[in-house]
Image: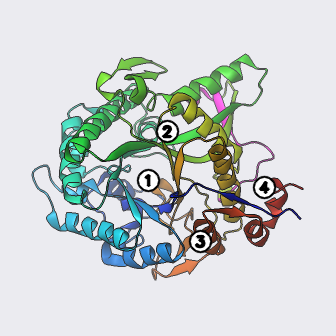
Amino acid sequence: MPQGAYHFPKGFLWGTATAAHQVEGNNTNNNWWKWEQEGHTDGSAAVAADWWGGRWREDFDRAVEAGQNAHRLSVEWSRIQPTPDTWDEEALEKYRAMLRGLKERGMTPMVTLHHFTDPLWLEEVGGWETEAVVPLFEKFVRKTVDALKEYCTLWCTINEPTGYALNGYITTGVDSFPPGKNNMKLAMQVQANLIRGHAAAYRAIHLLQPEARVGIAHHYRSIAPQYAWSPLDRLLARSFFQAINESFPLALADGVMRSPIGSVRIPEAKGTQDYFGFNYYTREYVTFDLRHADTLFGRHFFRKDAELSDDAFLALEPDGMFEGLKWVVRNFPNLPILIAENGVNSADDSIRPRYTAQHIHQMWRAVNFNWPIKGYFHWSLVDNFEWSFGWKYRFGLWGLDVDTQKRIKRPSVDFYAEICKENGISSDMVQKYCPEVFEKLFPS
């Protein structure tokens, strides 16, 4: 049996990621709480993982004991600025305590300033549909960064902005986001304002903290034609790829947002990334189908023989990770890369070990080409409220009993701990935790 290990560069960041609304609990002043109360989600976040009640401390203890040296979290705009004219200094102090807690544990914080949620007061004045949001977001960013900069230099302005725009303004059904509108023109308008908001935040942060590293977290979705020989399938795949993967991040490179309904020049966005934040989960296929006019006649699905996660939510397509990283390096050759999210929903943990092993192996392949990947944040540290799907999907290394707040240790906790402490993945680990993929990672 082959023996060996795939190691990563010295100083590599190994962590997990969370988001405020998903773990804090009792976030009652934002658009997602309202969306939940209106019955659009599978249950309510309620107290979530009770981080606002202080249980972040024990979760950070578990993370550092497991060898993690970094953590990505987000702050909640509606807590910090509960009304247009007020700031909650106690909320800012709670976030300072969280970041101080990470630093005291020897962990590098990465702070996301906008992770899907908006204050109710912002929604009431048009939210990201109006360009007036840009100075409002910049004002919030200035206040927050000024309060937290003692403990953090790594900032993510906006998490998955394309997902925010598409899920809130195009997607219909169980996985839609607030405000639940179906309007392509509005979606592109929202995305353009998110780009403007990021650019304003980028400059504001650097004025406050010149040494800061600032970027976004982009959800890369691998999209392939079902039939490579079909011009229609190739056209659809290319169109969806551009809309989902290119329209936002490329605007930060050249100042032009390209979309299926036209281009918008946003010159202030050019050159506003210090790193590329890369989120990857799965790959989908598309084929031309006249019955799917609502998705531009494209039917989307997973590969027929792909292994699927709980409830067929994700397909295990690890080589899509390498494909996506190759795309980043080709389009952003001078930017360091952080894997800001990667994980799978698996309540019984049966899939997570091999998903994790195979994706980290693909990341190592990329590092072996000398691509500048600097860290990996597994989604997630503990089960959290998974947006419109509520508590249906369990992404945590640690499970959560929502009623008792008891943390439930899954086998993947120890597997990921060994990876973090080794700064790599070895044949012994794979043999121990997911022998079924040993031959794929360490072929004879």
Query: What kind of residue is marked 2?
Result: Thr
Asked whether residue 300 is drawn in magenta, I would say yes
The answer to whether residue 383 is left or right of residue 38 is right
Residue 308 falls in image quadrant: bottom right
Q: Residues within 10 Å of mark 2 (few under 14, many from 20)?
A: many
Q: Which residue is mark 4?
A: 441
Q: Residues within 10 Å of mark 1 (few under 14, many from 20)?
A: many
Q: Which residues are magenta?
A: 292-310
Q: Quadrant of the N terminus?
A: bottom right
Looking at the image, which residue is at 39% across and 42% down?
A: 215
Rendering colour mode: rainbow
* Residue 88 drawn at (x, y percent): 15, 62
* Residue 160 drawn at (x, y percent): 44, 43
Mark earlier in primary sequence (1, 2): 1
Mark 3 vs mark 1: give the one in front.
3
Q: Which residue is mark 2?
A: 171
The answer to whether residue 444 is left or right of residue 313 is right
- The reply to whether residue 438 is in sight is yes
Asked whether residue 18 is drawn in magenta, I would say no
Q: Which residue is mark 3?
A: 417
